[in-house]
């Protein structure tokens, strides 16, 4: 027999509405009532949903469902019962702040598909800044799931997205919704400016485990369809490294054995950019870490965030000379890498990431490098190819060897696909790395989906067009777009801060400001550490942390034009301002500061020379404002200490 609450929900979904009332359906609201998610039967009995913020549409009526073995369970299903619940918990986090809050209302709708008799569950959660849904299909044996949901946006919306050719390393385009052509691919997060000043939203996914990743495909009429990894044309990086035949193999939908649990489809939303940047919904939709592997959770001792040096982008060159013997060259390479640890120690940085040349070092050299670095407070990470991680036995042997040598972390490269087998490999690597207390940085990767809550040994991942891309024509617009697009999904290894010509249309102040604006618990610096030590702003740079207690996005931030972030670590506040391609002047309100006086160190662009910086010291209080005048591609950085 149904409980009264379940019976009421059942009636709402199955009985006609009284005259003048809303159509039959279930509306779930977030804790403060502003965000609502509505599920109802649509035309032809198809299950549909819609999302609203403060009564204004964010997702118009759109299909809701899942295909299993070719059958769409959305049409022709009836509700058996509805269970409601609520959650309110806090957990440590390494994103935009140190403590995340999982505060939401949820519902599980048990469905029965009339034609096949299949039972399945639609689970809903609504936060104050997000709405999410997923599907659970019980069963045994092998079955093939596929996508069947969509996202129709309000007319007049503006969107920012990039396609799938470069996997998750594209450049975002801004388009009015009706300019988006049919068939266009959008790699989540897809960011939306809602019409009429209603706010902002973004579509992405959370808790991607044991399933293919999601991309979106436009219908040319204002809607985007959910698509899984097998249906997405293979990226150029994947076919380059693994070939067309492998790409064809991964184009076949992958089976799931046993119960099917999809990732969460997530819509972030808020009246301003701060709301979507500071949302905790994505990590909250992931399960907590395994206490056996992480006995103190995120605060387990060997999970060490920090800043890393990295030789790859900014020399010195280690190419073999024409008259250099292989043995002498290998020794020179070793000494260059060893010296980078010395420089990291001088900067007070915690890590060094070593590319594939480490494989030419002997066991004794590796032990020497690890010991030398450890004496300077620096840990060593090494690069590995994802292709070499596919054999579980060999992978575990390598990880055990690295742990025995004292290596702290691995950089795993060239995954380049979101097929289920690739997603499974991510999880296997994280699990086996955790067994050996190894930190992980994924490159050639997809977007994060909150996995570091479950696997806190994932310290960062690429899945972004960063400074490795020398051919990027201009950085200013790109860098002022990323905080409100890709970084909404989570941390990213952009490898920021270069002080030479690779910075192109951006200034030193702009480059330094990326260290404040971009989120990466292990922040891998692109610059040669000696160039940082030689820079007039070195003392400011050395104090910028890689993790934050609090983040605020300040006005007049605008996607692709200006990013103004205030971030707190302990009792210090930092401000990072990234300017886009146009000149700009505005007053920066310091109202985010605490009570009392602060010592302020300010870093401005110096005249028209992008490779120069002007430092200023002054006192400041929360009642003050700073008049900023920014050149195209310019920036501003400030540190406020009590």
Image (cartoon, rainbow, N blue to C red):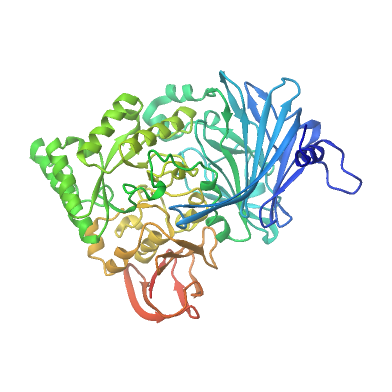
Task: Tell me where residue 284 appears, x and y as whole percent.
Answer: 53, 47
Camera-side residue of 147 and 614: 147
Q: Is residue 99 visible?
A: yes
Q: Quadrant of the C terminus?
A: bottom left
Q: Is residue 427 above or below residue 177?
A: above
> Measuring 87% from the left and 42% from the top, which residue is drawn there?
17
In this image, 119 relative to 472: left or right?
right
Q: Quadrant of the N terminus?
A: top right
Q: Is residue 362 visible?
A: no
In this image, 357 relative to 599: left or right?
left
Q: Residue furthest right?
A: 19
The image quadrant of residue 360 is top left
Task: Tell me where residue 322 appears, x and y as whole percent.
Answer: 11, 40
Camera-side residue of 103 and 394: 103
The image quadrant of residue 456 is top left
> Measuring 30% from the left and 29% from the top, which residue is drawn there?
396
In this image, 558 relative to 7: left or right?
left
How many numbered marks have been drawn onto this rendered protein structure?
Answer: 0
In this image, 305 relative to 124: left or right?
left
Camera-side residue of 253 and 89: 89
Q: Is residue 497 above or below residue 454?
A: below
> Measuring 24% from the left and 57% from the top, which residue is drawn there?
529
Task: Tell me where residue 33 appears, x and y as whole percent.
Answer: 70, 56
Task: Tell me where residue 426 appears, x and y as whole percent.
Answer: 41, 34
Q: Is residue 601 above or below residue 314?
A: below
């Amino acid at each position: 027999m149904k409980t009264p609450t379940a019976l009421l929900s059942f009636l709402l979904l199955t009985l006609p509405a009284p005259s003048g009332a809303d159509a039959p359906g279930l509306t779930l609201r977030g804790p403060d009532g502003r965000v609502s998610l509505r599920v109802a039967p649509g035309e032809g009995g198809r299950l549909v949903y819609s999302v609203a913020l403060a009564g204004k549409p964010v997702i118009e009526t759109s299909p809701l469902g899942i295909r299993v073995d070719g059958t769409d369970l959305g049409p022709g299903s009836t509700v058996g019962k509805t269970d409601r619940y609520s959650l309110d918990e806090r957990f440590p986090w390494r994103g935009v702040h140190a403590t995340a809050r999982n505060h939401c209302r949820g519902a599980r709708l048990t469905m029965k598909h009339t034609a096949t008799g299949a039972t399945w569950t639609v689970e809903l959660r609504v936060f104050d800044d997000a709405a999410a849904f997923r599907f659970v299909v019980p069963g045994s044996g092998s079955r093939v799931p596929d996508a069947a949901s969509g996202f129709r946006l309000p007319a007049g919306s503006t969107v920012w997205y990039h396609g799938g050719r470069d996997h998750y390393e594209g450049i975002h385009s801004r388009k009015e919704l009706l300019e988006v052509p049919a068939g266009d691919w959008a790699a989540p997060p897809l960011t939306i400016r809602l019409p009429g000043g209603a706010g902002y939203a973004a579509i992405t996914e959370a808790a991607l485990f044991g399933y293919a990743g999601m991309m979106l495909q436009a219908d040319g009429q204002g809607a985007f369809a959910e698509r899984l990894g097998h249906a997405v044309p293979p990226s150029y990086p994947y076919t380059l490294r693994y070939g067309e035949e492998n790409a064809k193999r991964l184009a076949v939908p992958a089976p799931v054995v046993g119960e099917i649990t999809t990732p969460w489809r997530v819509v972030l939303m808020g009246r301003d950019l701060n709301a979507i940047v500071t949302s905790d919904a994505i990590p909250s939709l992931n399960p907590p870490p395994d206490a056996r592997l992480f006995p103190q959770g995120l605060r387990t001792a060997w999970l060490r965030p920090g800043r890393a040096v990295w030789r790859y982008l900014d020399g010195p060159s280690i190419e073999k000379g024409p008259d250099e013997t292989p043995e002498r060259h290998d020794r020179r390479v070793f000494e260059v890498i060893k010296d980078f640890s010395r420089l990291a120690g001088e900067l007070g940085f915690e890590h060094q990431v070593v590319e594939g040349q480490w494989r030419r070092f002997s066991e004794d050299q590796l032990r020497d490098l690890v010991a030398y670095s450890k004496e300077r407070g620096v840990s060593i990470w090494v690069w590995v190819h994802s292709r070499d991680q596919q054999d579980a036995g060999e992978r575990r042997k390598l990880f055990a060897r690295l742990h025995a040598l004292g290596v702290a972390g691995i950089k795993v490269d060239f995954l380049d696909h979101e097929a289920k087998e690739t997603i499974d490999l991510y999880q296997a690597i994280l699990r086996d790395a955790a067994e050996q207390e190894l930190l992980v940085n994924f490159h050639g990767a997809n977007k994060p989906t909150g996995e570091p809550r479950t696997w806190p040994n994932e310290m960062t991942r690429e899945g972004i067009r960063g400074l490795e891309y020398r051919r990027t024509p201009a950085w200013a617009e790109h860098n002022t777009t990323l905080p409100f697009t890709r970084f909404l999904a989570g941390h990213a290894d952009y490898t920021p801060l270069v002080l030479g010509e690779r910075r192109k249309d951006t200034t030193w102040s702009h480059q330094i400001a990326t260290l404040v604006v971009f989120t990466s618990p292990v922040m891998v610096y692109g610059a040669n550490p000696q160039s940082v030590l030689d820079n007039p702003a070195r003392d400011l740079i050395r104090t910028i942390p890689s993790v934050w207690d609090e983040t605020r996005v300040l006005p007049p931030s605008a996607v692709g034009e200006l990013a103004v972030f205030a971030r707190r670590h302990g009792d210090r506040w930092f401000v990072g301002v990234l300017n886009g391609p146009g000149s700009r002047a505005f007053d920066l309100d310091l109202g985010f500061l605490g009570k009392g006086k602060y010592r302020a160190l300010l870093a401005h662009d110096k005249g028209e020379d992008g490779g120069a910086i002007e430092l200023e010291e002054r006192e400041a209080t929360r009642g003050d404002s700073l008049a900023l005048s920014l050149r195209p591609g310019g920036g501003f950085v400030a540190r406020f200490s009590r």
